Amino acid sequence: MDAIVEIRQRARARIKRIALPEYKDQRVIDAVKMIAREKIADVVFLTPDTIDKRENERYTEEYYNSRKSRGITVEQARKTFEDPLFYAAMLTRDGKVDGFVAGAAHTTADVCRAGLHCVGVDERLMTASSSFIMAMPDNPAVPDGALIYADCGLIPEPTPRQLACIAISAAELGRKVLDVTPRVALLSYSTKGSAKSIMIDRVTEALKILREMAPDLLADGELQADAALVPGVGKIKCPDSLVAGRANVLIFPNLEAGNICYKLTERLAGARALGPLLMGFKRPCSDLSRGCSAEDVMDCVAVTSIRS
């Protein structure tokens, strides 16, 4: 299965309005043309000429009023809204667009800050995180054509509850965007007690919380990567598990492990990495790697459209 082809087809089936605020970046400019040609989404390309100045002034005032208790000044608020990124986030908050995509010319911290301060987090989880869709259509070890990796971009050392919330968000992403039944593996260097440490305890505690929060979700842990992904190994190490050997959503114990693994998978296994896709917000928004291509921008727009 070619997951990217499927994602584009789903986006075409229900055209959504997605804001792109990085008007100076040539890759984004090229992506806008590609999206129009492929009929992926209705792009709101934000430039100084297309931004409503009165609306931007109103958003600036709203932003100042919401952040002044934290020490922000009027001048700082005005400086913030000189960047269309925050205008895009406010349009998303108000439902005037269905989501926004940025990150080609901004850091993950910049994009996440716009999401946190303007869109807000989902009260169910109260945990903002990120994931990558790792598309590998020609890999026989990946029957669904793609895996989801989380968290690879935001939370350095997640607590057990945060790990559980990351798993719920990533599973929802898999169900909605990839149209698969999520099978979630909480990864570790241990499988079912084969080693002992505080780090492993954190993963096993996360599984307990996850099963309380989402009892119908197929999830297991702690699992080593081979036990999670390789049917033969999963059968030997966890013969009674409904996830071992068949996982398609991989939850890493910390940011370091997740970030290293997604880059290795991308560079050595030839995977397409879409993301970081921001999760846990009230409305969809997506980050981009600053090394992204125009095609990456287009496909992140497609994912954001489906999520909305």
Image (cartoon, helix red, strand yellow):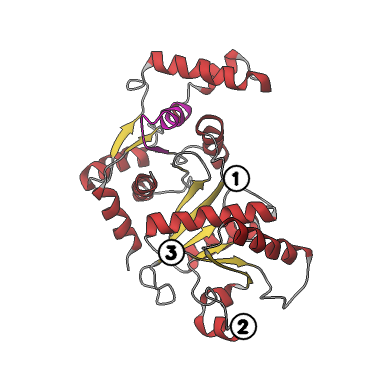
Q: Secondary structure at mark 1?
A: loop
Q: What element does badge 3 sit on?
A: loop
Instruction: Give the Cα separation between the discs numbered 2 and 3.
Output: 27 Å
State the residue position of label 3: 271
When the figure is inspected, residue 56 is found, relative to residue 94, above or below; the finding is above
Percent of width and height locating residue 206: 66, 60
Regarding residue 151, the answer to whether it shows in the image is no
The answer, for residue 224, to whether it is visible in the render is: yes
Magenta stretch in the rendered image: 86-100
Q: How many marks?
A: 3
Report whether 29 appears left or right of 169: left
Q: State the residue in front, 79 or 8.
A: 8
Q: Cα distance, mark 2 to mark 1? A: 32 Å
What x and y, as percent, mark residue 259?
58, 57
Badge 2: residue crowd in 10 Å (few <14, some 14–19, many ≥20):
many
Where does residue 21 sit, x and y in percent of width and height?
40, 32
Could you tell which of marks 2 and 3 lies nearer the N-terminus?
2
Image quarter in which the N terminus is found: bottom left
In the rendering, which numbered label is found on residue 12? none
Whole-number angstrom distance, CA of label 3 to CA of label 1: 27 Å
What residue appears at the point 60 percent right and 42 percent down from the top-left corner? 126
Viewer-side label of 3, 1: 1
**Relative vertical location of residue 305 with respect to residue 272 in this rendering, above or below:** above
Q: Which residue is mark 1?
A: 127
**Which residue lies at the image location 55% right of the left edge and 76% below the top edge?**
244
Q: Residue at x 60, y 62 (%)?
A: 211
Location of mark 2 (residue): 237
Whether residue 36 is in magenta: the answer is no
Residue at image location 48% in from the left, 45% down from the top? 290
Is 72 on the left or on the right of 35, as rendered? right
The quarter in which the C terminus is drawn is top left
